Image (cartoon, rainbow, N blue to C red):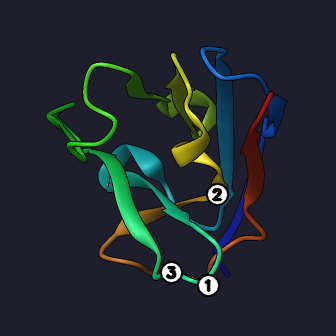
Amino acid sequence: QVQLVESGGGLVQPGGSLRLSCVASGIRFSINTVAWFRQISGKRRELVARSTISDNTLYADSVKGRFTISRNNAENTVYLQMNNLTPEDTAVYYCNTIPQYGDWGQGTQVTVSS
């Protein structure tokens, strides 16, 4: 059974930074493309960033140059470093593999506000 546990969210002022973490059990990140998604209230979940097993990365245009996805395969963990945050980044952030093999985790809330 795949379980994904996201953490690291919180309240931050515009221009601030956060580092999100996602730990998985029941699936090996090392042999999968991993990704971060976010869901803004009232909107569909959207892809933020993804990293293939060969560390090729792709970012949504809205976060390019500000967010960085990385992984620690030994710890089966994926990270999302978020810099220069804006109120438009406020959302619940989720991780998952592509393709998806398990249910979504609970996500971690990121709120950017002064």
How many residues crowd mark 2 within 10 Å: few (<14), some (14–19), many (20+)?
many
Quadrant the N terminus occupies: bottom right
Residue 4 x %, y %: 68, 63
Amino acid carrying mark 2 in the image? Ala
Q: Residue at x 76, y 54 (%)?
A: 108
Q: Secondary structure at mark 2?
A: strand
Of tags 2 and 1, the one toward the viewer is 2
Q: Which residue is mark 1?
A: 103
Amino acid carrying mark 1 in the image? Asp
Asked which quadrant contains residue 105, the reply is bottom right
Residue 12 x %, y %: 79, 26
Residue 15 x %, y %: 60, 15
Q: Which residue is mark 3?
A: 43
How many residues crowd mark 3 within 10 Å: few (<14), some (14–19), many (20+)?
few
Residue 58 x %, y %: 18, 41
Q: Earlier in the sequence, mark 2 or mark 1?
A: 2
Q: Which residue is mark 2?
A: 91
The CA span between labels 1 and 3 is 19 Å
Q: Residue at x 78, y 70 (%)?
A: 106
Q: Which mark is residue 57?
A: none
Q: Pointers 1 and 3 in contact (CB under 8 A)?
A: no
**72 left or right of 107?**
left
Judge whether 82 appears above or below 110 on screen.
above
